[in-house]
Amino acid sequence: MTQETESIDARLTRILNAFGARLGILLRSYHLDRQGIDPADVEQEVRIRLWKAIERDRSGAFHASYVQRVVASTVIDALRRAQVRAAEPLPDEEDSAAAIIEEGVGPEQSAGDEARMDGLRRCLAEIPERRRLPITMHLQGHSLQEIADVVGVSAEAARKLVSRGLDGLKARLNELGYGDFDD
């Protein structure tokens, strides 16, 4: 280990010693286990985020309020990921032709839905590659931070990619007559 890394590790240890008990109490207060989330996983993510913050800002002071914000944002992200996982996934292109027709949905509506999905796929294919993956992930319910991590950009850059990409997608869908998407 280098001197610099030891310094970061020592600071993290000092912060965890100072706020570790509060961190555990705070995490338990969210009752994450009721949501099917392992509190130990969230605690590990909090530790990683604190370690990264110390690495970024070596001279900063990390007070209880900062640690509390890190815990809250980590819990929110975990809850969002749990909701995304709980949602039913969209069918793959290969599976869409063999999709099970829901009770009460007629063949005309099913064919119309398939045509709209084909139109959406064509419009997505026309979007520049840099924006296509972020938009697809956004439509699947991923958070901006998850998109940023996969694409390798900041959360703000991911937000801009999604926003501009959706604007282009809406405009193209309007042109093709798939609806009016004015906000």
Image (cartoon, rainbow, N blue to C red):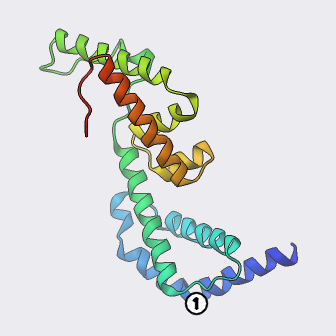
Q: Nearer the viewer, residue 76 or 139?
A: 139
Percent coordinates x, y for residue 18 in the rendering:
58, 90
Image point 52% across, 70% down: which residue? 43
Q: Nearer the viewer, residue 162 or 112?
A: 162
| Quarter of the rendering occupied by the C terminus | top left
Image point 71% across, 78% down: which residue? 58
Q: In this figure, which residue is indicated by the disc labeled 1?
A: 18
SS state under label 1: helix
Looking at the image, residue 179 lies above or below residue 78: above
Looking at the image, residue 27 lies above or below residue 85: below
| Residue at far bottom of view | 18
Percent coordinates x, y for residue 88 in the rendering:
34, 36
Looking at the image, residue 125 lies above or below residue 14: above
Q: Nearer the viewer, residue 146 or 32?
A: 146
Q: Quadrant of residue 113?
A: top left
Q: Quadrant of residue 19?
A: bottom right
| Crowd around label 1: few <14 · some 14–19 · many ≥20 (10 Å) | few
Residue type beneath disc 1:
Ala
Percent coordinates x, y for residue 11 in the rendering:
70, 83
| Residue at far right of view | 2
